[in-house]
């Protein structure tokens, strides 16, 4: 490694600068290529949980509801009205697209999609949120009613799942690998796990989505013209280098994806609040944001960003205070002779390993001995869902509705019922979640959700880290792409190559 003004410059960055590959260029064809840090795992929107799958599914499927810039629900496939506190009527819009197999999308398909999620043996990660649905009735081909067990003003925002054809659902068609949606793109081919091609229906333009795990290799391929577009998961040194290239364009946009460190509260060591507080004060978020992200991130104090309608603008990120960290460790019974020892799990993504290595060093300076454990995504995520960890780092991507607090923190949401992977049991959180769900208006709910965020900052089942900005890097002949706040790929609808 080389060091410059206190910033660690990896050798691969130096090699990149000297490579001379920037002048190489591959012949262009009619395919626009998008370099991905990770491949999609599941193209059935009822079951997809990873960010790449969710973003591609938005292109393949239509949904009843979408969201505005403040994450408030707005009509997509359908308009709705609340008939009673427990009954919502949705009416599909005229002129909507058919499914890619030529069949008509109607109310029965919507009902079948949600009923399949609610089936007792579905295994869908969305079932916990949607279990407040008592029943669904199809009134006619364009109209259906949702009946609820209890009132919830947030309910329309829960209906943002891609709609599948009822015939395929009843025949157990493998949507996860052969999607049939009604979105602006269809799957053209998926010859291998790390490469698939989407066809834009409006004009036949092909987009090849290619997994290139190493960020340096992704950048080299962009420089050589082997890919046309990159988004996110690039360290600041590479972004600075790309920004200086005349044949490329790099743009940034504020993001809402929330990165955090999670704890296993069933573990006797990380169950200690003083230990979690010590770790929180030992991490210099500002330094990581500056040196690793090139200031293209902002420290976080809560899961929801401040601009969210239920965000808590008054919460301050936890301070970097290594002296206080050592005091808390001493109060918890640790010392230089008997230091705190912890295991920290992350994925094999090079950027995530780099961040974890810096956190490891920062914790060491506070007297904490952290063992870094990195695994391929499947193994890593499987361990997290199974509770096999003391500490781990992940991000919540594309969160729109504050029902995430029930899903991730309520004592009834332990896996597989939800994502309370750290086994938080707190009566105050449970009561606040109930109060929020019973709020008579969004304003009343917002107050309760802000109280939840304040309480979580006290309890620290998660250490909030930052909201990463989004970054888009592309060849100069690519036009029409706009960054979205949640990092979706929706702008591929308008993306073109300029002759």
Image (cartoon, rainbow, N blue to C red):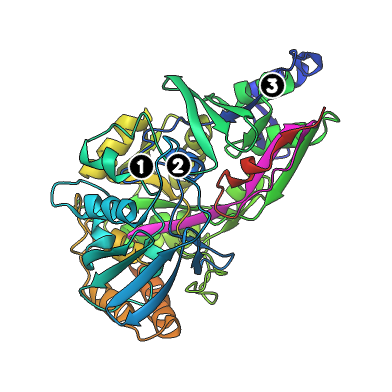
Q: Residue drawn at (33%, 78%), measured in percent from left and top?
A: 436
The residue where tag 2 is placed is 57
The residue at which mark 3 appears reads as 30
Residue drawn at 49 percent across, 39 percent down: 56
Q: In the image, is 265 to the left or to the right of 313?
A: left
Where 388 sits versus 120, above or below? above
Q: Looking at the image, which residue is at 35% across and 47% down? A: 336
Q: Position of residue 5 (x, y in %)?
A: 73, 39
Q: For the residues labelled 2 and 1, say whether their Cβ atoms are less than 8 Å apart.
A: yes
Which residue does the numbered mark 1 point to in the structure image?
A: 48
Q: How many marks?
A: 3
Residue 204 marker: none
Distance CA(mark 2)–CA(mark 3): 23 Å
Q: CA distance from mark 1 to mark 3?
A: 30 Å
Q: Earlier in the sequence, mark 2 or mark 3?
A: 3
The magenta-colored residue range is 461-484
């Amino acid at each position: 490694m080389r060091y410059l003004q206190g910033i660690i410059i990896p050798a691969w960055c130096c090699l990149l600068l000297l490579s001379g590959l920037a002048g190489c260029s591959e012949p262009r064809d009619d395919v626009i290529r998008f370099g991905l840090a990770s491949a999609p795992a599941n193209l059935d929107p009822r079951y997809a949980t990873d960010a790449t799958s969710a973003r591609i599914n938005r292109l393949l499927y239509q949904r009843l509801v979408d969201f505005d810039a403040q994450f408030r629900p707005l009509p997509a496939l359908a308009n709705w009205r609340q008939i009673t506190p427990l009954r919502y009527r949705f009416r599909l819009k005229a002129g909507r697209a058919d499914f890619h197999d030529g069949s008509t999308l109607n109310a029965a398909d919507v009902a079948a999609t949600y009923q399949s999620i609610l089936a007792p043996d579905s295994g869908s990660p969305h079932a916990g949120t949607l279990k407040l649905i008592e029943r669904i009735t199809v009134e006619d081909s364009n109209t259906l009613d949702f009946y609820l067990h209890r009132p919830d003003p947030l309910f329309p925002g829960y209906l943002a799942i891609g709609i599948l054809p009822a015939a395929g659902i009843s025949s157990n068609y493998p949507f996860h690998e052969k999607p049939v949606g009604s979105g602006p793109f269809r799957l053209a081919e998926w010859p291998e796990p790390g490469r698939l091609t989407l066809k834009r229906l409006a004009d036949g333009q092909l987009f090849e989505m290619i997994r290139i795990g190493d960020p340096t290799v992704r950048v080299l391929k962009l420089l050589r013209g082997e890919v046309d577009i990159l988004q996110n998961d690039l360290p600041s040194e590479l972004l600075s280098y790309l920004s200086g290239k005349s044949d490329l364009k790099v743009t940034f946009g504020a993001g809402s994806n929330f990165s955090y460190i999670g704890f296993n509260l069933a573990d006797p060591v990380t169950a200690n609040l003083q230990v979690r507080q010590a770790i929180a004060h030992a991490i210099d978020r500002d330094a990581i944001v500056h040196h690793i992200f090139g200031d293209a991130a902002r420290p976080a104090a809560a899961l929801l960003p401040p601009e969210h309608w239920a965000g808590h603008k008054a919460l301050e990120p936890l301070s970097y205070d290594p002296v206080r960290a050592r005091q808390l460790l001493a109060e918890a019974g640790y010392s230089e002779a008997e230091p705190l020892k912890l295991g920290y799990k992350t994925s094999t993504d090079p950027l995530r390993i780099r961040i974890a290595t810096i956190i490891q060093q920062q914790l060491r300076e506070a007297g904490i001995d952290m063992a870094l454990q990195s695994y391929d995504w499947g193994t890593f995520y499987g361990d997290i869902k199974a509770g096999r960890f003391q500490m781990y780092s992940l991000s919540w991507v594309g969160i729109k509705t504050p029902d995430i607090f029930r899903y991730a923190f309520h004592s009834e949401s332990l896996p597989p019922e939800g994502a309370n992977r750290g086994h938080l049991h707190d009566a105050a959180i449970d009561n606040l979640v109930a109060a929020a769900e019973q709020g008579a208006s969004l304003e009343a709910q917002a107050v309760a959700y802000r109280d939840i965020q304040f309480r979580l900052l006290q309890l620290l089942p998660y250490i909030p880290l930052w909201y990463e900005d989004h970054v888009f890097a592309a060849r100069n002949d690519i036009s029409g792409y706009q960054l979205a706040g949640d990092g979706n790929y929706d702008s591929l609808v308008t993306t073109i190559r300029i002759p």
